[in-house]
Amino acid sequence: MQTYAQFLQDRYNVGSEGPLADFLSRRDGRLLLGDTIDLNELAARYGAPLEVVYTPQITAQVTRMKGYAAQAREAVGYTAPFLYAYATKANFAAEAVRTALKAGVHYETSAAADVEVAHMLWREGILPSDRLIFANGSKEMHYLDAILRLRIAGNGNIVPVLDDLDEFQLLQRAQLPFRFGVRERAAGNRDGTHYGNDRFGLSSEEILFVAEALKSSRHSLVVYHAMIGSQVEDREHFVAMLRQSVENYARLRKQVPSLRYFNFGGGVPTSGYDLGFEFDYVGFLTDLMTVVKETCERFNVPVPELIGEFGRYTVANHVVQLLEVGQVKAGESGTADWYLLNGSMMVSAPDSVLVDQEFVVLPLEGWERSAREVRFGGRRTCDSDDVYPRPNRPALVLPEQGKGMVVAVCGVGAYQSMISGRGGAHHCLAPEARRVVIEEVNGKLIFTEVPQQSLEAIMQLIGYDSPRPASLPAMLPGLRDPRLPAPVGRVVAPRTRLQRSSRSTVLPRVAASL
Ligand SMILES: *Cc1c(COP(=O)(O)O)cnc(C)c1O
């Protein structure tokens, strides 16, 4: 029988000690996040489910990418700067945005609320005045209004990236000069695999119209934006898809001397989804800079400052969900067994259902045990779709004897908590796990705990005015709260000692220990 450690060795060529990915390692049989945070210890101390948020990983991501860009610039002799922007829609959590800004990022917004947050952070000095703010997406009135207010408040670095001509008509009336960007529509679905991405941006005729209109105005055009997709793991394809956009930039630059930035948007991939992940970031930037440099030479225009808007790359790896296998159930004839989680992938990692996203999943223990194929089912939703991986995907491989095993679901720091929502009533009222936020302050790691969401809080959110789950003591052995008096009342649970009925029923305790 193959052990789990052997399986990992064969499949991913990683040992059971040492680095597993660029954000994850195992030392002395313990799984470490950022080679620092002992997930086994956190699971022992707090129990599962537990959300572990480790913001120094964000700093590491930003710092590394700046290093990669420096290497690429050096190799290519690329004279213009490289700018790292954080696409905040990937994770708006204050600690994530704050950490990224501290690491020196520029800012990318996708909606009105996003600009309001930026405005607040700018007023507080957390978003420094020298950082650029790229406002992308189709802009409704509130979004345009928020951009205008930030500009009028004195921020000259807010750069609206135009998505249609109506936006332009409104914003160009502003008395204060704007530095504009244009987003190239053709880039969005150039390879035919990013349906939905082609709804953004302007046609080449519209871009020329904007450029022409700005010539005799107080405003200027500075950014050419071309985004080709998300989690693009084939770097040659990535650069090949941008090549035409670079040429379009250079052609436009000949007519518009104020143009100075080429922004390739998002798409740079995260390592958080697959242990087998490989992407040569330096190679990608080197190739891209080479193409830009050669193209600009051919068109006889200066090379632009390069901007990347990093969403999932910035934040995916700084959050891990620890989930416990609460029950094991045999699969139906010939199919993988079920590891039923005291939690829910559908709630913790909604992209697993929405866009078939996979995540790095590793057990905290049992690496010496036999490996077996299993699938996850969420016990907290009772939803037949709350399964992972999706039915069309191969099963997971994990150690056997899964009951009680805690697994780390990695790579969930981008989009997942924003899509699922924070502090809301979730599917089947699945409570949000206890969260431990670990930040670095003056060289020290500071732990902040947020308790698991209470059932009372959830009930209130959905309109129960004074939610008071019956305060009867739990009836199951092991669940008994010693502070409470002896149990009375009716209980909907097997093998209780007291069956005498009373008015109230016992609400199940949605406790971590259940
Ligand atoms: C969502 C988005 C990003 C971030 O994308 P990732 O693939 O997560 O890096 C960047 N730019 C724009 C315009 C976006 O809409």
Image (cartoon, rainbow, N blue to C red):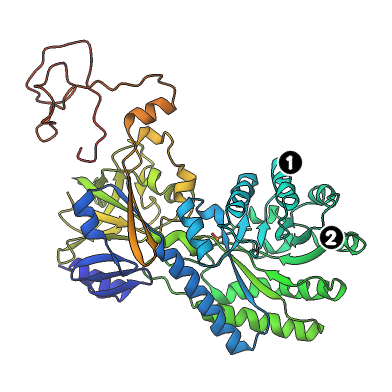
Residue depicted at x 45% and y 43%: 420
| SS label for mark 2 | loop
Q: Position of residue 378 (x, y in %)?
A: 31, 42
The label nearer to you, 1 versus 2, is 2
Amino acid bearing label 2 = His
Report whether 500 appears left or right of 252: left
The spot of residue 61 in percent (x, y) is 46, 69
Query: Within 8 Å: ligand 1 and the Cβ of disc 2?
Result: no
Q: Earlier in the sequence, mark 1 or mark 2?
A: 1
Quarter of the view holding residue 106: bottom right
Q: Mark 2 = which residue? A: 219
For this view, does 207 lie left or right of residue 265?
A: right
**Callout 2: few (<14), some (14-19), or many (20+) C-alpha neighbours within 10 Å?**
some
Disc 1 from disc 2: Cα separation: 20 Å
Q: Dividing the image into four equal quarters, which quarter contains ligand 1?
A: bottom right
Q: Quadrant of residue 302?
A: bottom right
Residue drawn at (44%, 60%), measured in percent from left and top? 316
Vertical comparison of 62 with 423: above or below: below
